[in-house]
Amino acid sequence: MLYLVGLGLGDAKDITVKGLEIVKSASRVYLEAYTSILTVGKDALEDFYERPVILADRDMVEQDSAEILKNADKEDVAFLVVGDPFGATTHSDLVLRAKENNIDFKVIHNASIMNAVGCCGLQLYNFGETVSIVFWTDNWKPDSFCDKINANLKRGLHTLCLLDIKMKEQTIENLMRGRKVYEPPRFMTVSVACQQLSEVSKNRTDCEFSPSTMCVGLSKVGSDNQRIVAASLEELCKYEQMGDPLHSLVIVGKVHPLEEEFLKQFYLTNFDNKAHFS
Amino acid sequence: MLYLVGLGLGDAKDITVKGLEIVKSASRVYLEAYTSILTVGKDALEDFYERPVILADRDMVEQDSAEILKNADKEDVAFLVVGDPFGATTHSDLVLRAKENNIDFKVIHNASIMNAVGCCGLQLYNFGETVSIVFWTDNWKPDSFCDKINANLKRGLHTLCLLDIKMKEQTIENLMRGRKVYEPPRFMTVSVACQQLSEVSKNRTDCEFSPSTMCVGLSKVGSDNQRIVAASLEELCKYEQMGDPLHSLVIVGKVHPLEEEFLKQFYLTNFDNKAHFS
């Protein structure tokens, strides 16, 4: 059996009791380590599980899934994913390959940012389509997220923005020379995301959001030291105290009274009320 | 401290390790029992936790929150919620009342249907706004969900439909006489939801979905005997083998190749390919 086990968002103890039992008894345990990160590393997980864990990077999962699935028709293999197992497309792909090989699979669900974002007080059923915001380069500044945010705002809906993660990036030189030398991981911060959004809002006349649009920055959701800050897009561009990754961002749509009352506790102390609700 | 602890979707073992530690050490433990249900009841939870649990119905949470929060500034109180704690508005309200009384709170997140629905293979970032479908009566047939589904389908997005739950309902006679006599709980099935949707699609000319629109019915997501069935709206109207509650429904939008490949495993065996993708 192939078990896809969600680890939730915080630390080692955010695994479910059912998930932990599977991890303890499985023949092999893989940790997917490229679509998201926990606040603790592999070592902390191994200590807590009292067993070794194999790191699975993107190359391994996408090109060497046979290794992961080996003998999984006869023994139990656990594949650990930060958040919920169906947060990323690659995991659907692994399940399909298991099925091709007549290997059964089971999913142990857990929290993901897609539902845990509710901790800021904005109701999940008032969110529209989720968008991804990728790091811009000098020559590549995609802004297709703008159409999606526009469509959400026109309907009064909030938008969860998932911020880019770069794991095992290679410089162009290293890539061309075939050198497997990787850059340190990079995680987009709330302020960088807001700077990109702010630039789009100034360059595109059809943009439904502006530098004064109310946004919510979140970091390390689900951990003891999570942070939630509500302020205008402009203020969040300059706000550098969001703390360690991972960060997420919400573009706020129409707020209902209970949402507003809840959100108030997260207003920046120097919040001067310039930010407005859409 | 007030702890809001998500229980996830399946049985007692879907609580996180962190959540279980809190439940075991708290002074009092309440179980919210009106917005959702687990596949196991209060007794199974008490056996697993090895401690008593107090059932909290809607009246208690909304009208007697002082009782729940009593002494929570000095001791730990756990409030257990099926799924994730921020799935329902009433829990935001409890947190706000805690804050008014200078009681700190912490959230232990878990899976909810809002992210676990990804198990059908449709990607979460291709979902639009979630809708609720309530039981129609002879005189009250709200169809405002139609506008939201329309808006999602126009953008190619899937729609998660949360189906009505009636807990502790009173007949009009019992209500008027002030008799606290309650009807048995009722849970909307996929087929009833589809019948209502189908009627709307026939009555409204602006409807973006039709009886032949591809839908996905889900039951008991996250449990060992969960069921997922993909078929046309029309076929699901007549499909009575979805199993025990809770049920959920997805109106499928534009499907990407990987989504379609994954979804295929859930096609009704007698699926005659009449259903189409939007």
Image: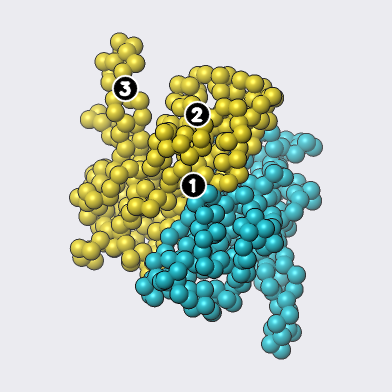
Chain colours: A yellow, B cyan
Identify the mark nearer the N-term, 3 or 2: 2
Q: Kindly identify which numbered label has been placed on residue A52.
A: 2
Residue A252, above or below B61: above
Residue A236: x %, y % from top left: 25, 52
Q: Is the residue at mark 2 from the same chain as the one at mark 1?
A: yes
How crowded is the residue under tag 2: few (<14 C-alpha within 10 Å), some, or many (20+)?
A: some
Seen from the viewer's position, the closer of residues A105 and A41 is A41
Quick one: SS at disc 3? loop
Quick one: SS at disc 2? loop
Identify the mark nearer the N-term, 1 or 3: 1
Quick one: SS at disc 1? helix
Residue picked out by circle 3: A182
Residue picked out by circle 1: A14
Label 3, label 2: how many angstroms apart (C-alpha)? Answer: 24 Å
Residue at (46% x, 52% y) in the render:
A116
Given the image, what chain letter belongs to the residue carrying mark 3? A
- State if disc 1 and disc 2 touch (CB < 8 Å): no
Q: Kindly identify which numbered label has been placed on residue B145.
A: none
Seen from the viewer's position, the closer of residues B112 and B128 is B112
Residue at (67% x, 47% y) in the render:
B223
Could you tell me the amino acid type at mark 1? Asp
Residue A81: x %, y % from top left: 50, 36
Residue B56: x %, y % from top left: 60, 71
Residue at (47% x, 62% y) in the render:
B3
Identify the mark nearer the N-term, 2 or 1: 1
